[in-house]
Amino acid sequence: MTARNPAPPLPHPQPPAAAGQALRDAAQGAAYAWARPTGPTGHARAVSQMYSVLRDLGIAARGLARYQTAGTPPAPASPHFTPYLAASDRWLLDAWQHLDGVLAAEGLGTLPDDSEPGTVLCQAARNAILAWRQPEGTAADRDTTVEHLITAIWFLAIGALSLAAYAPRRRTIELRAVANSLAEAAACLTRAIQGPAGDTEPGHNPDPARHPDGRP
């Protein structure tokens, strides 16, 4: 009886900060690529890639909320770190949902090349899910990881606005809404590592998990 070949081992996850840097660099490359005019097929493919990345970043951000810090002594996190990470996840979900209608109308696009900037970005976002599933490190590493994510999100917002510039008029609104939601996600992440203004004011009790329009 012939023994079966064992399944190849799963890839070892990157350190959280390294995964964040790879995500940031890939987002920058995709933003530059999406700033150039493309035909309908290329535009549909870029929107599909954006859709995939936003979904995966929402999943990855949930892992970052559980970041375990180490050190001697460990640096205290902002008391709102976890709530603001949760809020950023909600805004990423908002951005992702805005693209539902665009994909329904324009389709998923053609299968891209593995070296295409949007494809590289999709892979970096998937790697971040694994790297941030049970993240741990120093407080400085944690903040560096979040800073990389913030920069990546800003590049995605720029990319969304670039795609909006070349979108059919009826799709411009959805893509601009994506950029707005991404800006809110980046703001929440910034507050997570810096602390919101007025945290020490008496009676200050922000609810970052709630959208400005009152949605839970």
Image (tube, rainbow, N blue to C red):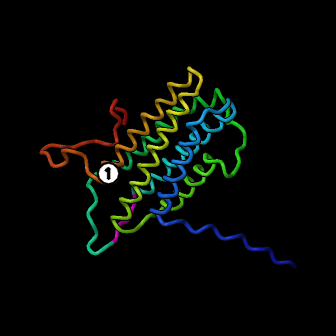
Residue tagged 1: 192
Q: Which percent across, then down, holds residue 142?
A: 37, 61
Q: Is residue 103 shown above or below 201?
A: above
* Range drawn in magenta: 66-70
**Which residue sits at x=38%, y=39%?**
184
Q: Is residue 69 left or right of residue 23?
A: left
Q: Which percent across, then down, holds residue 40?
A: 67, 29
Q: Which percent across, then down, holds residue 31?
A: 53, 42
Quadrant location of residue 1? Answer: bottom right
Q: Is residue 64 shown above or below 162?
A: below
Q: Neighbour class for label 1 at 10 Å: few (<14), some, many (≥20)?
A: many
Q: Which percent across, then down, holds residue 214?
A: 33, 31
Q: How many marks?
A: 1
Given the current orientation, which residue lies at the most extreme top position?
A: 169
Observer-nearest of 89 and 113: 113
Observer-nearest of 77 and 216: 77
Q: Is residue 77 shown above or below 210?
A: below
**Which residue sits at x=44%, y=62%?**
17
Given the current orientation, which residue lies at the most extreme right position?
A: 1
The secondary structure that most of the magenta stretch takes on is: strand
Given the current orientation, which residue lies at the most extreme left position?
A: 202
Q: Is residue 20 left or right of residue 87?
A: right
User: Split into 4 quadrants, where in the image is the C terminus?
Assistant: top left
**Which residue sits at x=37%, y=33%?**
215
Give SS at disc 1.
helix
Observer-nearest of 117 and 49: 117
Q: Report if residue 106 lies within the magenta region.
A: no
Q: Is residue 185 left or right of residue 172?
A: left
Going by the numbered disc 1, the residue's amino acid type is Ala
